[in-house]
Amino acid sequence: MTVLALLLAVVAFAFLVLALVLASKAWAIACIVVGAIGVLIVIIDIIVKRKERAGKSGKSVNGE
């Protein structure tokens, strides 16, 4: 999932460059959407990995 988030960051950067070169609002919106999806994937990845570590150590995520 981390590789996918990195790929989305590259795509978002390409959309940003297109938006600046073409002065296009549509490319700017596409950049924001793709970037937001990448951030969501990173957050989901962090949560999943945190739960996996908590499961291996026998503790819950909240430390209870």
Image: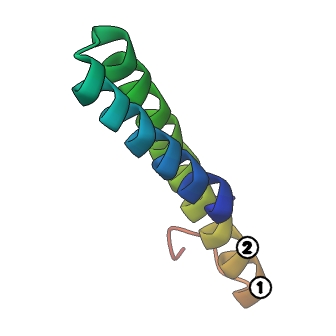
Q: Point out which mark residue 13 bears.
A: none
x, y percent for residue 30: 43, 21
The mark total stands at 2
Question: Label 2 neighbourhood size at 10 Å, few (<14), some (14-19), many (20+)?
Answer: some
| 1 and 2 marks in contact (CB < 8 Å) | yes
Q: Label 2 amino acid? A: Glu
Q: Nearer the viewer, residue 39 or 3?
A: 3
Q: CA distance from mark 1 to mark 2?
A: 6 Å
The one of 7 and 39 positioned closer to us in this rendering: 7
Q: Which residue shows up at 39% across the image and 29% down it?
A: 31
Vertical order, 34 against 42 (above or below)? above
User: Is 51 above or below relative to 41?
Assistant: below
Task: Read off the residue under disc 2.
Answer: 52
Q: Nearer the viewer, residue 27 or 50?
A: 27
Q: How is the image coloured?
A: rainbow
Q: Secondary structure at mark 1?
A: helix
Quadrant the C terminus occupies: bottom right
Q: Amino acid at mark 1?
A: Lys
State which quadrant residue 58 falls in.
bottom right
Quadrant assignment for the N terminus: bottom right
Q: Outermost residue toward the bottom?
A: 57
Residue 48 left/right relative to 20: right
Residue displayed at 53% across by 55% down: 42
Image vertical order of residue 34 relative to residue 11, above or below: above
Q: Is residue 10 left or right of residue 18?
A: right
Q: Residue at x 45, y 46 (%)?
A: 39
Residue marked by disc 1: 56
* Quarter residue 23 falls in: top left
- The structure residue drawn at horizontal position 60% and vertical position 71%, both measured from the top left corner, is 50
